[in-house]
Image (cartoon, rainbow, N blue to C red):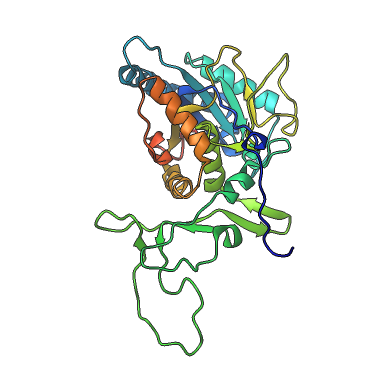
């Protein structure tokens, strides 16, 4: 028999989709890049001093949103960029982060590697998300644009003329503005590069890895039914190389679960454009429906109503001085 063949499989033979423990809120206390680390522990202390009031406010707000008598489950995390540039070593970097946070009464429950969003052991989270991208075609179009898996780009609307080559002798159409698919009176058109092909292989973009990071924190990723990059305990010593460090390292043995119903990230204002791009990417990810159902049912059992749109479960605090504030 040639071509497509019908295949039948017992439902019990399909991979079981495992559930994850979930906090009510995952608070990202910041990002760390090489230029920020070069500012030394004093710069880290300034950052956590600015973050602390927002953490307290988030805890108070969450407590007010939960049913009476239900204590909030909040976990904290910190993301270190080792994907675009490796610097220092995890043991030194994490020790300084923990010290600086502790000076302001803050506990970092989990530390994650940005490279872990690309590859976590034998699993490649970025590839898993890429396979689930479903580009949102503009209204009244036939969806003939190349898929994002081929071209490495996503948009939130209709591309303007000139974004693709026209036949040499074709009639000029004149200027036409780009249009956002779900515009509110006026368009905000965004085009997001999700990867580029480099001599050393495919390189994922910062907005795309940030999207994978958010999906991990929301507990939305599975590989053959298993959770992707589950946190690993730090043990007796911190890793001395980035390759040795797991994608997500649990520093606090008493921490609430890493993944959560909602996320809050504290970033500098210069990252607003990146996080706007994150919304475009996540808005076009077809998350496994069974995973979605599990999370919604768990939330409902706690008296919590979650937005169907994942983007609406993500919140930010953007601070002002982008030349000084650590992100």
- Give coordinates of residue 200: x percent, y percent: 73, 55
- In this rendered view, identify the residue nearer to me: 299 or 219: 299
Total numbered circles:
0
Tell me, yes or no, if residue 115 can be seen here. Answer: yes
Q: Residue furthest bottom?
A: 169
- In this rendered view, identify the residue nearer to me: 117 or 296: 296
Residue pictured at 31% horizontal, 58% vertical: 187
- Give coordinates of residue 69: x percent, y percent: 35, 9
Residue pictured at 67% horizontal, 50% vertical: 7
Residue pictured at 36% horizontal, 67% vertical: 140
- Give coordinates of residue 217: x percent, y percent: 52, 31
Tell me, yes or no, if residue 262 can be seen here. Answer: no
Q: Quadrant of the N terminus?
A: bottom right
- In this rendered view, identify the residue nearer to me: 74 or 139: 139
* Left or right for 144, reference 248: left
* Left or right for 100, reference 296: right
Q: Residue furthest left?
A: 185
Please, is residue 64 above or below residue 11 in the view? above
Query: Which quadrant of the view contains residue 304?
Result: top left
Query: Which quadrant of the view contains residue 155?
Result: bottom left
- Give coordinates of residue 28: x percent, y percent: 49, 29
Residue pictured at 58% horizontal, 19% vertical: 98
């Amino acid at each position: 028999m040639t071509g497509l063949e019908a295949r039948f499989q017992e439902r019990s033979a399909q991979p079981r989709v495992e559930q994850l423990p979930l906090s009510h809120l995952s608070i990202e206390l910041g990002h760390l890049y090489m230029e920020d680390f070069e500012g030394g522990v004093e710069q880290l202390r300034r950052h956590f001093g600015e973050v602390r009031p927002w953490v307290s406010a988030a805890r108070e707000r969450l407590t007010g949103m939960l049913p009476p008598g239900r204590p909030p489950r909040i976990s904290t995390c910190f993301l270190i960029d080792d994907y675009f540039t490796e610097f220092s070593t995890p043991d030194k970097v994490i020790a300084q982060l923990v010290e600086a946070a502790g000076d302001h009464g803050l506990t970092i429950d989990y530390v994650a590697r940005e490279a872990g969003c690309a590859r976590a052991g034998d699993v490649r989270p970025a590839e898993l998300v890429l396979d689930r991208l479903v580009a949102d075609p503009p209204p009244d179009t036939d969806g003939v644009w190349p898929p994002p898996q081929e071209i490495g780009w996503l948009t939130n609307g209709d591309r303007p003329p000139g974004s693709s080559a026209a036949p040499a002798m074709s009639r000029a159409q004149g200027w036409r503005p780009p249009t956002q698919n779900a515009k509110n009176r006026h368009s905000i058109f965004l085009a997001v590069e999700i990867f580029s092909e480099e001599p050393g292989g495919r390189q994922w973009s910062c907005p795309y890895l940030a999207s994978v990071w958010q999906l991990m924190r929301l507990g939305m990723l599975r590989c053959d039914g298993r959770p992707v990059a589950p946190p690993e305990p730090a043990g007796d010593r911190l890793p001395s190389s980035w390759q040795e460090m797991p994608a997500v390292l649990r520093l606090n043995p008493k921490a609430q679960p890493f993944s959560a119903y909602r996320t809050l990230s504290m970033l500098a204002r210069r990252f607003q454009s990146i996080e706007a791009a994150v919304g475009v990417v996540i808005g076009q990810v077809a998350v496994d429906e069974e995973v979605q159902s599990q999370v919604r049912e768990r939330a409902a059992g706690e008296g919590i109503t979650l937005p169907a749109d994942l983007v609406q479960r993500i919140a930010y605090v953007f601070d002002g001085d982008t030349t000084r504030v650590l992100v």
